[in-house]
Amino acid sequence: MMSLHSRRHVWRATASPQSFTTLEDVELLQRVAMGDQAALDALYARHAAVLLRYLRQLTRDTLEAEEILQDTFVAAWTSAKRFEGRSTVRTWLCSIARRQWRDRHRRHALDLDQNTDLDQLTDPAPTPDEDVLEAVAAEELGALVERLSPAHRDVLALAFVDELSYAEIAQVLDVPVGTVKSRLNHAKQALKKLLSPREEIKR
Amino acid sequence: MKLDHAETREQLAAFAAGTLSAEERAAVAAHLRECAVCAREAAEWASIRGAVRQAAPEAILRPHVLSNIHARIATAETHFNAPVLWQLLLAQVPLVRRQIWTASALVLTLGVGVTLALRYGADAFLVLLAPLVAAIGIAFIYSPENDAPLEITLATPTSPRLILLARLTLVFGYNFLLGLLCSTLIALNGHAMVAVQLLLMQWLGPMLLLSAISLAASLRLGSTAGVGIAVTLWGVRVMMTSSAVQLNLAMQQSLAVLNSTNVFTVVLAALILLVAVGWLPNQEQFA
């Protein structure tokens, strides 16, 4: 899994400060662990934008998303020593961001994880009338995404905003890979369900 | 690489997200050319990708965020150089079940109180109680089934083994100190005809051994089983030491070895501990 995704360490490097462009994320984090603030800035330049986007999806409040982004990088600074290389640095940062959000919203965090019961249900077979999603404009569908449950928004954002693989999402959510797959499918079904009453009104 | 229909369906979200390897991507694309059902679902995932990215628009990183991080790091720096192991130990204090602390203290205080009041057999009482109390506490230090904070701790990049060892150190250290305190109290009162270190030698080895067994059992079979096994073993030990049971010389000698602090008990406890910690699944963090 690591080898499949290691390519992504490098292509983001263009956005980082000059002297660090050639360093991989893991090397940067090692420097952070030794107290190198410039290395933290380089990691920030690479990953902050996508983390902020993810946090915006979780909180939908820009100011709070920015605060949690701060918490995330402060936490990364203090716990860089404990990074063990079991995941990519970006996956690790996503886990921290998600945990910081959870710590602030214990009650919502419950909603976020309670969804696991749903995941146990078998995947519903695809209905023949499958092409409804394509017919809807992205803006309209985007508005519907915001009405999904936190758990569904979370997994969709990790897949399509953070662009993490199933295995990486599984690490961030601390669930098996199979659960990630079924949760994504449930999110899709939920989106369709939100869409169906609208379709019926049209007819 | 060739993917069948079901395998392809699983990969369609990742296909739309662009997170597949080149090889996986080619395999999915090949299937999509042949399968209308999957092709339609892939198109759906592409719409969803667009919608999700629409719902989380590219956010502008405002400069004050980074400067706030710098400011907070500057104040956090004092903590930064504190030894990580010590931080880890302290962090576990609120996460270990509170009942462990009070239960151990209560039982041992009661034990000391009773024996001091009886003015007789004080040392025997302590020697019997201290290892059992420690072993019972240790059976509860690491039980994923009813430990909500543990779930969060496991999401941190700290290895579960390290967390286990930190908690073990805390609870065992606590019980050791309690035992030491009680031994000192008893010795100071002159009820036992032994010095503190002799009293210590009588319970420390058994405490190590019983705690290691209790930990191994609780990790494997759950806290309740850990307690059950520790109590049973200890009960057998008490029965065999009592004069009611006739033992041959070899058994008496091995019992004497097990009932004191020596190289054998310490090494045996360390071995059991090693096996117990080694058993702990490494991938639990991301199970």
Image (cartoon, coloured by chain):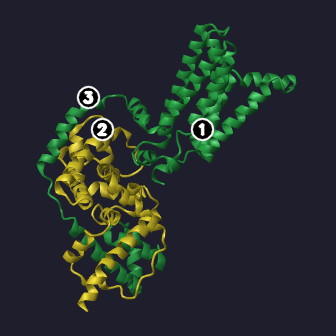
Q: Quote the CA–CA distance across marks 1 and 3.
A: 36 Å
The image quadrant that residue B188 belongs to is top right
In depth, the one of A25 and A153 nearer the eye is A153
Callouts 1 and 2 close, C-beta under 8 Å: no
Taking the spot 42% from the left edge, 82% from the top edge, the residue there is A126
Q: Chain of mark 3?
A: B
| Chain that is green in the image | B
Give the x, y percent position of residue B210.
65, 32
Residue B280 position in % (x across, y down): 55, 45
The reply to whether residue B261 is in sight is no
**Does B197 sit left or right of A79 as displayed?**
right
On the question of residue A130 being in view, the answer is yes
| Residue most extreme to the left | B63
Tell me which amino acid carries mark 3: Thr
Colour applied to chain A = yellow
Measure the alpha-carbon separation of dots 2 and 3.
11 Å
Q: Secondary structure at mark 1?
A: helix
Residue indicated by mark 1: B215
For mark 2, what is the residue? A78
Q: Are marks 1 and 3 in contact (CB under 8 Å)?
A: no
Query: Dot 3 corresponds to which residue?
Result: B78
The spot of residue B253 in percent (x, y) is 80, 22
